[in-house]
Image (cartoon, coloured by chain):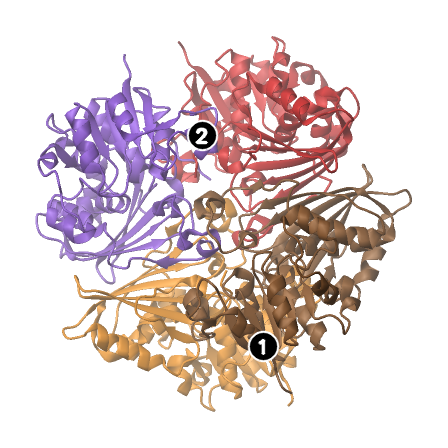
Chain colours: A brown, B red, C orange, D purple
């Protein structure tokens, strides 16, 4: 079988590098070209010595990646991908944006939270936002661009989808307390992510004003069929990888523990990458690190009638590169788990 | 001035050792005796080599500590302190229990959450639960026993007290998402606190069933004058020390950001150990570690009308040994901050 | 092609679990049976929740593993594997011992350092100690048992082999300062590996008396053709995985930097799993974690005429399970890198 | 008693901030002024929120600090302190340089390793390099400038002094393998100290070319009375604080374990801040963190006749700010341990 040629724009960012790690072992694709603005001309292994003798490919520019690839992954700051996607689509290529430029349906949300407008409105009609377990039917023939979901929104949407759809909870009581490892902040240097500032520290950040909020609300509103407003507070966790979202929502009358558990088990029984943990177990980011799994545990506070959902993913895999590959697999007709059978190491 | 003789029962647990660290530099007291069941006969510095040549005192038994001390601190598993307190009080001594045996006023709560009864009911009339900033007037002449507050409840009570008293929030919407460093689990070995299990991991535990729940509710109910039920979920954080409690509560009509901030600043303006952070700052456990401070930051989610309070302490200091010394200072008429001017190291 | 059936005795220890992780994705084998003394009857995923829905196989006993497998891996405390190997070989099976029972040729060394005697001396004639890059020619038809090398000795032997063989250094000046992540201490609980004791701590242990010393000396003596005595000091590093060995040896007259580098590059030019880093780079355990690579960097202290070799591996992969699989591949005639194309994640 | 006025130039670097932490609780001094080039005009607590309400002093400039202080501490990059010291001494003040400008006696060493010349040669006749336990007699009336020792050299000099003086070891066999926490790299941002690069990583750096080498050799040469050349390799340790130096040296004939231990115990028996650990114990940075102690443990490799000395300090305290305060105490006639009775926390 011929291999599909894939390329990565922004290959030296954390998500870009993680894409390389996954794509190198993918049975259906060949890594054709990679680019970086900061390191153009260098070998990728000069930036990431872990890849020495494994991927010594030279970093080129964006146009070259688009020209040489059938599928292009882009991992760039928001605002840069519409133009690139237009070029790619114009050449008949598929484009998967790991950034925010194709995630929000309502342009007003994009303007409000990102401060930019959509310049290529027509382009958005060929794009879709896709968490495969929830939206894979969206990937029809007309779709050439995927807005790959954000890390926090992935953990939250998968954790809330069954209850949100069911109507058994009052979604406007939803409080989401998320915690992310430091790779979530990217490769760029900052005082906050300087080791001595970050190690043996813990704190929320962007409290109730994080840009992932409209993306979370978009999915929950679609699932429930009514407008949902949530409180979302992310925290910076002194670990390299992983997100844990602890979500609190008030159940409606008659929503029993058994009913809710059955909803979740039924929703995900055929989903390889979502594991609803047995009663009594608690999701831990340790158990999904370096893998494409999302673990969900369910807890009930009968004293206050709240459902507590704990959802955990590896922010770099299911929360970025892994999910992007899963989306590519669907878009290209590969096995959905191709290249993604990553067993999470226990320690 | 003569020094007050102090003793520690359970000196080899984490809170006991932290008491030693603080009391050694306390201007008004002399460490007279220390005990340990597991290490009786050994020197404390054999158990904690950090104390070599600093505190080579031998570990003795409980009766000796009581006999040789004016004030006795006890840091033991629950259920063991009533008998010891009785002995101490019988000899005219003061007794500060860092465990749970004198924290809950309502014996039914103690029975429900700890599975034990109070055996010495009369003794409880001479005891009080005391977070100094909230309850220092309780420490009258009749008090010879202090139920020193738990770590989570301290962070939560200080963080919620001004708003709880004010009546400006609907306390039954309160969701408390707390995160604690691993010393909170104590010195005893467990798989959960084995380094490779705990490092690069994160998870809630005892989700909505933690024993600190009734203590939290007791304080909030007293402050607000009405019964309060909360959802409380603690998480294990891969750091040695510190607690961050992120608290979410819906504000009532007319509770403005300015009103709420003024409440907090006014409540704590004369409190050395509670720092209400300036608008825009966020509490971080890094900034209070190894000190007796509680840092509080206030955040408002205007989209959902929720107040978000972030409260952080060092679980071993303000959450245990430091607060116990602060209570001793009040009980003995020392300066309230004696021995507690610990500057938190920046890194 | 029919799959080879493999089994693991001691599957719930860290090396055992890592074997599972690797073998599950190995193209030539099927995991047939796994055993554990402590957890017999449980599912492996109950012990390691990371494996939930990935490997829910039940843990059985040792005899069952031997009976159902063509190749048996054993990861047990020393002293237990001779009897098991005898059984396995008696049934015509291959046996790979990840422990110490088949590593030392000279029984006197085993007696001195492990305090035990070989009970099945004949068995040792069918066994060999094998670091593939150095000893793969040993795996002849008569070999049915492999003494899989220890973690420290692997990092050290690969780091020293070219210079040791060359005769260009005075090996009796060799000082080896090694640092290992905490998984090296195993899954068993101890105060030393209790998170708050281990985190933000660092110290040597078993200073100059570690049991890997005779194994190190055995290899270096063989390579150099003369008896070698080294000073070996391991340290416990607050990370989960990885070993760095920093080795100091005085060069003989005329051993230039260029000569030595050429020796290393030549020795390993065809070895996939040993990467001699370019001049100016320094080996870092970060770059080999979760992979089967050994990275080696060369440094020259011209002021003192010492060669400094830095060698790093993942103690659980190249230092245990990965090397065991590499040995199995050779023994069974699979591709040497089958199942071992693990790309080290950059973070 | 009147308080001595002290000032800090470079107060927002790590060593500067640590000086603040210590000096705020020093019984004999008042913090008069602090400066920072980057943050002039800001409050120190805006840079270090841990100091909020504890030290809200504004950051000023260098001249102001010199003018307002009796003793000036400077913590700046090398090359900047001669000019400042000249000013300070010209105004009759004492000057303690935590940098490298007054450490090396031989200007040729300074030129070779730092690439700069001494511009104020006369000034150096009023300065001295001082590790109090080794050199306190140097602090005569003519001394107004102290070259405060580097972190690595302090751990090494204290660890080697007794054996170096004794002549019982061959110092030219000395190999020093040091490991330092990340604060040793300072507050400035770099890829190496970015959390995800640094966490779960370990590596040597500046292998055998670190600038502390001539300072180490200067002290060992003085102590032994003969020129000493060492191999010194520092490593970056994923902890915030602390240095462990593991030192390997060949003993001469007749140097018994007992003789060597007696040398150490005798050398340090009256030194509060140096603890020679009992036979069988091993120095661990955990036991000295946040304190001014240096712990030393002695190990003997009888198989190779090497002495192994493990020496550990807190790089920010005994390795920088604490030792600077100890030097000030001696220079000003305060108790040598004033402000330095910092009990190392056990966890």
Q: Chain of mark 2?
A: D
- Residue C49 percent coordinates (x, y): 66, 60
Residue D214 vs residue C157, the one in the foreground = D214
If the image is split into quadrants, where does the N terminus of chain A sit? bottom right
Q: Secondary structure at mark 2?
A: helix
- Residue A282 visible (yes or no): no
Residue B335 vs residue A130, the one in the foreground = A130
- Residue A77 percent coordinates (x, y): 56, 56
Q: Chain of mark 1?
A: A
- Residue D200 visible (yes or no): yes
Left or right: where does residue A202 sit relative to residue B111? Answer: left
User: Which of the 4 image quarters holds residue D338?
Assistant: top left
User: Which of the 4 image quarters holds residue A170?
Assistant: top right
Q: Residue at x 70, y 71 (%)?
A: A144
| Residue tagged 1 | A69
Q: Residue at x 65, y 80 (%)?
A: C68
Nearest-to-viewer mark from 1 and 2: 1
Crowding around mark 1 (Cα neighbors within 10 Å: few <14, some 14 to 19, many 20+) is many
Asked if disc 1 and disc 2 are in contact, CB closer than 8 Å, the reply is: no
- Residue C157 percent coordinates (x, y): 35, 72
If the image is split into quadrants, where does the C terminus of chain A sit? bottom right
Q: Secondary structure at mark 1?
A: loop
- Residue A169 percent coordinates (x, y): 84, 46
Whether residue B235 is situated above or below residue B247 in the rendered picture: below
Labelled disc at residue B3 = none
Q: Residue at x 61, y 17 (%)?
A: B266
Whether residue B100 is situated above or below residue A322 in the rendered picture: above
Q: Residue at x 58, y 77 (%)?
A: A69
User: Which of the 4 image quarters holds residue A314?
Assistant: bottom right
| Residue tagged 2 | D45
Crowding around mark 2 (Cα neighbors within 10 Å: few <14, some 14 to 19, many 20+) is some
Residue B250 vs residue C74, the one in the foreground = B250
């Amino acid at each position: 079988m011929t291999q599909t040629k894939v390329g990565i724009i922004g290959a030296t960012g954390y998500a870009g590098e993680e894409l390389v790690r996954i794509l190198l072992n993918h049975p259906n694709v060949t890594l054709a070209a990679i680019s970086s603005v900061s390191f153009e001309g260098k070998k990728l292994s000069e930036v990431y010595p872990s890849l020495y003798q494994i991927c010594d490919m030279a970093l080129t520019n964006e146009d070259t990646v688009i020209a040489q690839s059938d599928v292009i992954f882009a991992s760039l700051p928001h605002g840069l991908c519409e133009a690139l996607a237009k070029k790619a689509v114009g050449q008949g290529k598929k484009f998967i944006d790991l950034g925010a430029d194709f995630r929000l349906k309502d342009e007003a949300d994009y303007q409000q939270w990102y401060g930019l407008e959509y310049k290529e409105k027509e382009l958005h009609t060929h794009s879709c936002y896709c968490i495969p377990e929830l939206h894979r039917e969206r990937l029809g023939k007309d779709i050439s661009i995927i807005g790959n979901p954000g890390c926090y929104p992935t953990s939250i949407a998968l954790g809330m989808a069954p209850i949100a759809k069911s109507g058994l909870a009052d979604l406007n009581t939803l409080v989401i307390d998320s915690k992310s490892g430091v790779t979530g902040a990217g490769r760029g240097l900052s005082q906050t992510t300087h080791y001595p500032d970050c190690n043996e520290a813990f704190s929320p950040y962007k409290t109730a004003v994080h840009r992932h909020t409209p993306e979370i609300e978009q999915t929950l509103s679609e699932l429930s069929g009514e407008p949902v407003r949530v409180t979302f507070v992310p925290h910076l966790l002194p670990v390299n990888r992983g997100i844990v979202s602890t979500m609190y929502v008030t159940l409606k009358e008659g929503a029993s523990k058994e009913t809710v558990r059955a909803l979740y088990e039924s929703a995900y029984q055929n989903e390889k990458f979502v594991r609803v943990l047995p009663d009594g177990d608690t999701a831990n980011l340790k158990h999904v690190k370096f893998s494409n799994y999302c673990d969900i545990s369910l807890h009930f506070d009968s004293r206050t009638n709240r459902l507590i959902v704990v959802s955990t993913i590896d922010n770099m895999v299911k929360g970025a590169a892994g999910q992007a590959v899963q989306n590519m697999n669907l878009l290209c007709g590969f096995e959905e788990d191709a290249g993604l059978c990553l067993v999470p190491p226990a320690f």
